Each structure stands twice: as structure tokens, then as C-alpha cells.
């Protein structure tokens, strides 16, 4: 029950934050005092809203009214739909009721500070120059303008990203149950965020979703292969230059006969690349690029797992590798998946 109340309060905070005009929001000392004692329903606003608005409208060709409409609900409806905890990070996930957007919390300081302080503006500039990038489209960044008891004690996360949902259209597709999803990372890495924790602390369902294998090939015509491979190389170079590691490729395989909804710019990796054998359409984006090697927590964690690795001999780890080495392994993983026709 408590968890349900917490989720309900958080979803309403996110909804109000998206629909609130950040230019009209003014901080005040009195509001800071009052909101400090808030536990669940914190105030959220959109950070750097002008940058994300330009990406949505001018780069990705979203209709702003439709974007806002995804967060509007009728009286009595929950603003967002809970997806659940998909890993060990403590993040919570929600989707809009129409399934067009996903909201992910960033409760860990080293993640949101990396995105906020180091990556946000370079990401904006890069996406302006690469409108068909395979990096996931982040449409808004929500922050709490006031410190509250809820955020101090970790009851309510104060930082959230809103991003496209490349599963958009599945719910309305007659073949929706045949859609296949894969969250792919280089398999020769040992992941301490997964392997250092006892299995008794998490469900089998959560374990099963942390790392996938794709035991097939992406059958692509030469032209599609060249465009996809060039985009992947450019995007991973951007992440490498930003010092990011531990990102993944989220891939969706859709029956070729399906014609699901496409949001905004009809980028090939979002509309779906038709396979050369005519059986599937492929969607793909790079996700979870919030772990930076230069952040204090990652450095401290690296020391822990390096010590653990000496004892456990688990092999190379995702957070002790260098960004260039991780990129090399990531590209090799994708290259081995591709079959050129």
C-alpha cells in the first residue's frame, strides 16, 4: 500500500512538472521552508527546457501539443503507468498511458550529476548535428528545485529523464505479442551491479531482464547496414569521448507485417528497418549512458570490484574498463550480430 501511495504521488509530481511552465516558476524562501517537510509529492520542474523543446520541435519533429497530450489524463486516471524496477540501480520506471514515452528516475548522484553537469549540453549539440542518431531521444529532464525530506532520505527521487519509448505502438498492434525485445551488452564482461549482490535479494524476473543474448543475425541490405553501422560508430565515439561506459543496445524485433505508430521524425531505427529476408522490422537505440568513469562513485566502486576480482577472478568488468575498451567490445558485439545481404 505504501509503495502504491508513493508511486501515485510521484507520478502526479512528474505529470504536473511536465505540464508546468518552467519560465513562470519562481523560487521563494517561504516555499523552500514549506516544501522541505514534503515526503512523497515533491515539486518538479523541467531543467534546461528550452534545449529539450528545440530538440523535440526542430530536430525530432514532435508535435508539441501531442507531446503534452501524452501526459494529460481524465479525472480519476493515474497520470502514468508503473513499469517497475528493472535492475539494481534503485531506478523506478513509468510510461505514459498511451505508451509513447518512458520516465526513468535517476536516484544515484553520480548518474544524474554526470548527465546534468557533463553530458546534457554536449548531448544537445550532438543530437542537433545527428538527428538520426541511435542514442535514445531524451525529451525532458525533470529536477526538484527544492530540497525535501523525501529527497534527502531517498524516499522520492528528485531527478528524472523522459525519453521516447521504442515499444510505442505495440499495445495497438494485432501482432503485439510477437514483438521481441533485447537489452544487449558485451557478454564477456562481469557486471558487479548484478553479480556482487546475492540472488536471494532480487526476483528471478529481475535477473532475467538484466542481460540478454541475441542468438540470431540482423539481416540487412548493404545500404541499411552502412547507415546503421556509421550511426553506431559515431554515437559510441561520442559516448567514449564523454567517458561513458556500461551502456546497452536496446533492440526490438517486430513482425514485418506490423505497421506500428512512429513518433516524430521517421528515423529508420525507430520506424523499423525491414530485414533483408522480409521477416522482421528492427528498432534499436542505445540506452543507459549515465555511468562515467571519472565520477567519484564509479572510481570507488572500481576499487571494490578490482579487489573482488583478484579474489573471485571474474574477468573484465564493465566499470573497471576504459571507455575506449568498452566501446571496442560493444562495437564487436554489434558487428557479430549483423548479416549483410
Image (cartoon, rainbow, N blue to C red):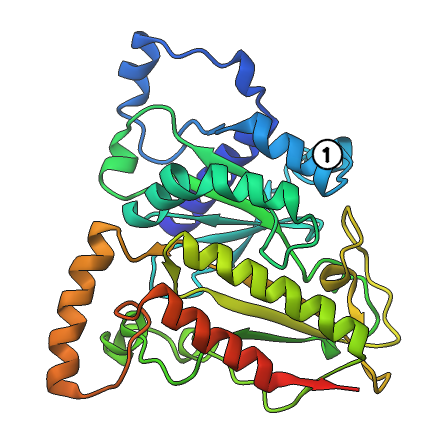
Q: Quadrant of residue 303?
A: bottom left
Which residue is under mark 1? 57
Image position of 126 (left or right of 121): right
Relative vertical location of residue 209 with respect to residue 23 in this rendering, above or below: below
In the image, residue 67 lies at what x, y percent?
A: 71, 37
* Residue at screen point 39% across, 67% down: 324
Q: Residue at x 41, y 52 (%)?
A: 242
Which image quarter is the C terminus in? bottom right
Residue 176 in view, yes or no: no
Image height of 13 relative to 4, above or below: above
* Secondary structure category for the residue under label 1: helix
Q: Residues within 10 Å of mark 1 (few under 14, many from 20)?
A: some
Query: How many numbered marks appear?
Result: 1
Q: Position of residue 234 (x, y in %)?
A: 58, 60
Q: Is residue 119 visible to the viewer in this orientation of the structure? A: yes
Pick the front one: 47 or 170: 47
Camera-side residue of 311 and 41 = 311
Q: Residue at x 44, y 79 (%)?
A: 186
Question: Compared to 137, does 303 lie above or below?
Answer: below
| Residue under the point 26% across and 53% down | 294
Q: Image check: 310 left or right of 254?
A: left
The location of residue 269, given as percent across then percent down, is 72, 63
Measured from the top left, where is residue 45 in percent x and y? 48, 27
Amino acid at each position: 500500500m505504501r509503495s502504491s501511495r508513493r508511486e501515485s504521488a510521484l507520478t502526479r509530481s512528474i505529470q504536473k512538472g511536465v505540464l508546468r511552465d518552467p519560465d513562470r516558476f519562481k523560487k521563494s524562501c517561504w516555499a523552500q521552508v514549506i516544501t522541505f517537510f514534503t515526503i512523497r509529492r515533491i515539486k518538479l520542474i523541467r531543467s534546461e527546457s528550452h534545449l529539450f523543446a528545440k530538440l523535440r520541435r526542430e530536430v525530432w519533429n514532435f508535435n508539441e501539443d501531442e507531446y503534452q497530450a501524452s501526459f494529460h489524463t481524465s479525472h480519476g486516471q493515474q497520470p502514468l503507468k508503473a513499469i517497475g524496477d528493472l535492475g539494481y540501480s534503485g531506478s523506478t520506471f513509468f510510461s505514459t498511458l498511451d505508451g509513447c514515452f518512458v520516465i526513468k528516475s535517476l536516484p544515484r548522484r553520480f548518474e544524474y550529476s554526470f548527465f546534468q553537469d557533463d553530458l546534457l549540453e554536449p548531448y544537445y549539440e550532438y543530437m542537433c548535428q545527428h538527428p538520426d542518431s541511435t542514442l535514445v531521444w531524451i525529451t525532458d529532464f525533470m529536477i526538484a528545485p527544492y530540497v525535501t525530506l523525501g529527497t534527502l532520505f531517498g524516499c522520492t527521487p528528485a531527478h528524472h529523464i523522459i525519453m521516447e519509448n521504442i515499444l510505442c505502438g505495440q499495445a495497438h498492434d494485432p501482432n503485439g505479442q510477437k514483438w521481441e525485445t533485447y537489452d544487449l551488452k558485451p557478454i564477456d564482461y562481469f557486471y558487479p551491479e548484478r553479480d556482487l549482490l546475492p540472488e536471494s535479494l532480487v526476483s528471478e524476473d529481475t535477473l532475467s531482464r538484466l542481460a540478454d543474448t541475441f542468438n540470431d543475425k540482423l539481416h540487412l541490405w548493404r545500404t541499411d547496414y552502412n547507415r546503421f553501422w556509421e550511426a553506431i560508430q559515431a554515437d559510441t565515439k561520442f559516448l567514449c569521448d564523454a567517458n561513458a561506459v556500461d551502456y546497452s543496445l536496446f533492440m526490438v524485433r517486430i513482425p514485418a507485417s506490423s505497421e506500428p505508430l512512429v513518433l516524430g521524425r521517421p528515423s529508420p531505427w525507430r520506424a523499423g528497418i525491414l530485414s533483408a529476408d522480409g521477416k522482421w522490422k528492427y528498432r534499436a537505440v542505445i540506452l543507459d549512458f549515465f555511468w562515467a568513469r571519472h565520477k567519484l562513485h564509479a572510481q570507488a566502486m572500481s576499487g571494490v570490484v578490482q579487489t573482488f576480482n583478484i579474489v573471485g577472478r571474474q574477468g573484465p568488468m564493465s566499470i573497471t574498463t576504459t571507455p575506449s575498451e568498452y566501446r571496442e567490445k560493444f562495437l564487436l558485439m554489434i558487428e557479430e550480430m549483423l548479416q549483410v545481404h
